[in-house]
Image: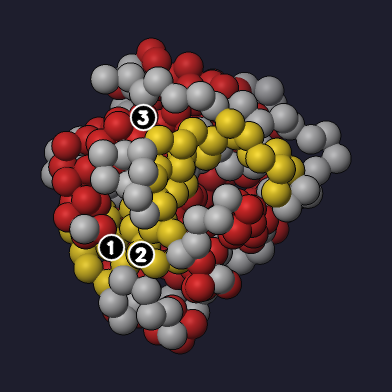
Amino acid sequence: MAVQTELKSIRVNGTELHYLEQGAGEPLVLVHGSLSDFRSWMLQVEAFSAQYRVIAYSRRYHYPNTWPEDGPEYSVELHAADLAALIEALGLGPARLVGHSFGAMTSLLAALHHPELVSRLVLAEPPILPWLERLPDGAPLQAAFVADTLEPALRAFESGKMELGLQTFIDGVAGRGAYERIPPVMHALQMDNARELKAEMEAWGRHGMRRGYFADPSCASLGRLRIPALLMGAERSPIWFHLILDELERCLPQARRVSIPNASHSMASGNPPAFNDAVLSFLF
């Protein structure tokens, strides 16, 4: 069922963010990943709004937010600050956060910097790639992802080959052939956010793993985070996502782990019933 809700906007942290709001009760904020926007959560908005006041927003630089020609450089820290400001401006705190991929990394940093604003945390495969350098068997996987995905995607975008950049990135995070299996409606959504992914790749190209694009929180800092967390992996995701979730499970003191079957990285759309059931069971 399609969500029929008026699109709203609010100005926070020097930018305008668009969002959908549906339902009543305790606040629940949905934080999308790369190449996505508020529309990627439609099946979750419909399911979660029966119990919660759901906010699905588009992060800075994502459709339909205005692209600022002189805006700040793309960084996960900037998105985390936007999220905290959004929660404060809408009076949502403490809120439940459900984040996917880059949105999960954004949610985790927001919780670390502003734990008073977060009551529960759902993290679906945050790409904390700097950790792989320190994890057993992680360094070769990081090197392969850089060589096979990040570097060729960046080269494609710099050459103006937007669709090739999208295909390279999507196949790298969701498995070979994933791009060809994308339904037309999702492909159109991703094309609306192609410029955003190009900005991400450029930030990574300038600063590498540890600055700008990726977060690198310490295990010690995570150990001080006293917020219940659900760590979500997908059965068919690349193995390096599972290694990162293993480390998060070790570091976070109140973590629970689930695996979504018959799905890869885009698990919320790949297996919505299993994803929604896992989130609601944890949040209840």
First in sequence: mark 1 vs mark 2:
2
Image position, residue 195 (x, y; %): 65, 29
User: Splitting the image into 4 quarters, where does residue 272 fall?
Assistant: top left
Name the element at disc 3.
helix
Drawn side of residue 31 relative to residue 125, left or right: right
Q: Nearer the viewer, residue 152 or 270?
A: 270
**In the picture provided, is 22 more to the left or to the right than 271?**
right
Residue at point 62%, 22% (across, down): 161
How many residues crowd around disc 2 within 10 Å: few (fewer than 14), some, or many (20 or more)? many
Residue 279 makes an appearance in the image: yes
Residue 125: horizontal and vertical position, in percent?
35, 54
Quarter of the image where the N terminus is located: top left
- 3 and 2 marks in contact (CB < 8 Å): no
Mark 3 burial class by Cα count in 10 Å: few <14, some 14-19, many 20+: some
Identify the mark nearer the N-term, 3 or 2: 3
Residue labelled with disc 1: 230
Residue ID for mark 3: 42
* Amino acid on which the number 2 mark rests in the picture: Arg
